[in-house]
Amino acid sequence: MGGGLNNNAGGNYAVVGGGDDNIANDEFTTVAGGVNNTASSYGAMVGGGQNNHATNQFATVAGGFGNTAGGLVSFAAGQGNLALGAYSLAAGYGNTVGGNYSVALGQGGTANDHNAFLWSDGTRAAISQGPDTFAVLATGAGGCGFFVGNNVRVSIGYTSAHDIDVTSGAYLSHAGVWTSVSDRNVKTNFTNVSARDVLERVVAMPVQAWSYNAEDPAIRHIGPMAQDFYAAFKVGDDDKHIGTIDEGGVAFAAIQGLNQKLEQQVKERDARISALERRLADLEATVQKVSAQMERSKAAPIPAANISNHGGL
């Protein structure tokens, strides 16, 4: 017993450092200080604060107010947090973790699934999304961002592109639109492509309906294989993935190629039509000329020399 008032170190090798009304009543338990804290299971510890309880083996409450670490080797800190699952962690305000190996941070989150991670901003009730999941509730304009190196950021939940302060990466808007950075200023090594050539390669590429091995076979998708796409266009990191920006670029080029093809066909058709119209006009002029000659021939008088007098007068 280090000091304080109304403290009880009742277990073998138990320690109460000080404070008021603290209890360390099992072997190797520790309450460092604070008020009304309890370490009541083998190897449990409360660092300080008030009304905190470490009630399972090797459970720890770092401090704060009204926290309980009730799972085996669990950890809690902040205010009103419950770490009840084995090897669980609850920190922040008003979080509950009932799943084993699970984490809830922030405010007002509940992670009762095993092996689940939850971050909650406290704007509404947030729960873990099943076993072995990672869930974040972040409703501010900045949304949720993941830095993956060299200022590349994958950002989720931005309200608009104006909220993004990154030079490369992508983001998912609140409306569910996945958007890749495509600013000219972050690009280099520009080369032109032949739209007609891209169109021909797209036409020759196999497109199939299929299912992922990891999905239910009833779930179907449609599209090319990454190997065929890479062989045709040599874009992207490898022949196992297709970047959405590359897929869209190929589609744009193919549409331009199709437009060029249609324009050429229309131009050739118009030339043929013009030639036929000229021929028709020439034929009509010839017909009119011949008709006029025939009419003149009918109207002309028969020469007297051509009249025979068989009866005489």
Image: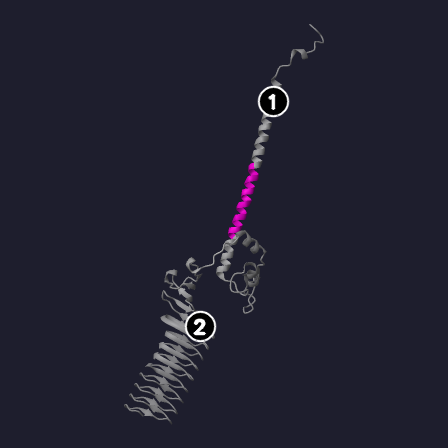
Q: In front: 222, or 149?
A: 149
Q: Give residue 134's mark.
A: 2
| Amino acid, disc 1 | Gln
Q: In the image, 205: left or right of 161?
A: right
Whole-percent x and y of residue 147? Answer: 42, 69
Which quarter of the rendered picture does the N terminus lie within? bottom left
Whole-percent x and y of residue 69? Answer: 38, 83
Q: Main secondary structure of the magenta part?
A: helix
- In reply to whether residue 264 is colored magenta, the answer given is yes
Report which quarter residue 284 is drawn in. top right
Whole-percent x and y of residue 248? Answer: 49, 58
> For the residue labelled by badge 2, is the local secondary structure a helix, a strand or a loop?
strand
Mark 2–mark 1 CB contact (< 8 Å): no
Report which quarter residue 11 is drawn in. bottom left
- In reply to whether residue 59 is colored magenta, the answer given is no
Q: Is residue 204 above or below residue 113?
A: above
How crowded is the residue under tag 1: few (<14 C-alpha within 10 Å), some, or many (20+)?
Answer: few
